[in-house]
Amino acid sequence: MNMFAGRSVLGVAALVVAAGAFAQAQVYRYTDADGRIVYSDRLPPPNVKNVQTKRLGANFVETSEPSLAAQQAAERYPVTLFSFDCGEVCQSAESLLNKRGVPFTSVNVQTDEPGRNRMKELSGDDKAPVLAVGDKLIVKGYNESRWQATLDEAGYPKTPAPRKVAPAARAADVPPPAATAEAARAVAPPARGGDYPK
């Protein structure tokens, strides 16, 4: 075996050992005195709250934030959904954005006069729903394939980043059903059809 090959084998072995040590690294997550969430590989100070110990098994950090691609697209092309209570059409439009994990601002053009004026300015029309992806990519009316293509063009990921499910609450932490606000009010189903233009 030549000297170069021997050094390569030793270098690879050192990397494997380092990767194994990192894979078992322990990280602490806690809330500091100023209310900021901190991640550290050092023991937290005694005056912090909500200390959690995490083991890193892979090169990732648990987060509920959108992916980097979604964040970059949202900075360049913020999405606004101009809609109203138009029933299934507007619900489908909102559902598409939610399924893709696209952060968006919703404007109800029936109740928001400045929002309705902004929609008219962008689309040249007063009919909703309208998808505004930045100020240049405007799609009038709901058409799933056109909306998908517009979001693709803006760089939004086709699927949302995977989310971790929160741990199940203990029975003592969950209020009885009669004590919840949802149980106190009746929920009516949304109107179908609404005032959507024919």
Image (cartoon, rainbow, N blue to C red):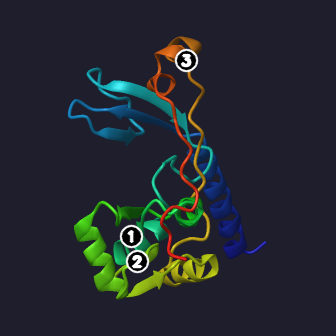
Q: Position of residue 195 (x, y in %)?
A: 48, 66
Distance from the alpha carbon under mark 2 to that under mark 1: 5 Å
Kindly indicate whether the residue at mark 1 contacts the one at mark 2 (C-beta within 8 angstroms): yes
Q: Position of residue 112 (x, y in %)?
A: 27, 63
Q: Nearer the viewer, residue 172 or 196?
A: 196
Circle 3 packing at 10 Å, graded few (<14), some (14-19), many (20+), is: few
Kindly indicate whether the residue at mark 2 contacts the one at mark 3 (C-beta within 8 angstroms): no
Give the residue number, with chain letter if any, for mark 1: 80
Q: Is mark 1 on a helix, strand or loop?
A: strand
Please state the total of marks drawn on the protein image: 3
Kindly indicate whether the residue at mark 1 contacts the one at mark 3 (C-beta within 8 angstroms): no
Residue at point 47%, 83% (across, down)? 139
Q: Is mark 2 on a helix, strand or loop?
A: strand
Residue at point 22%, 29% (across, down)? 33
Q: Which amino acid does label 3 sit on?
A: Pro
Rendered position, 14 above or below 37:
below
Q: Position of residue 44 (x, y in %)?
A: 34, 29
User: From the image, which quarter does the N terminus lie in?
Assistant: bottom right
Q: Where is residue 167 in the image (x, y as percent from the top left)?
A: 58, 30
Q: What residue type is labelled 1?
A: Thr
Residue at point 56%, 47% (across, down)? 22
Rendered position, 133 above or below 49:
below
Give the residue number, with chain letter if any, for mark 3: 177
Give the residue number, with chain letter if any, for mark 2: 132
Circle 1 packing at 10 Å, graded few (<14), some (14-19), many (20+), is: some
Q: Quadrant of residue 49?
A: top left
Rendered position, 123 above or below 101:
below
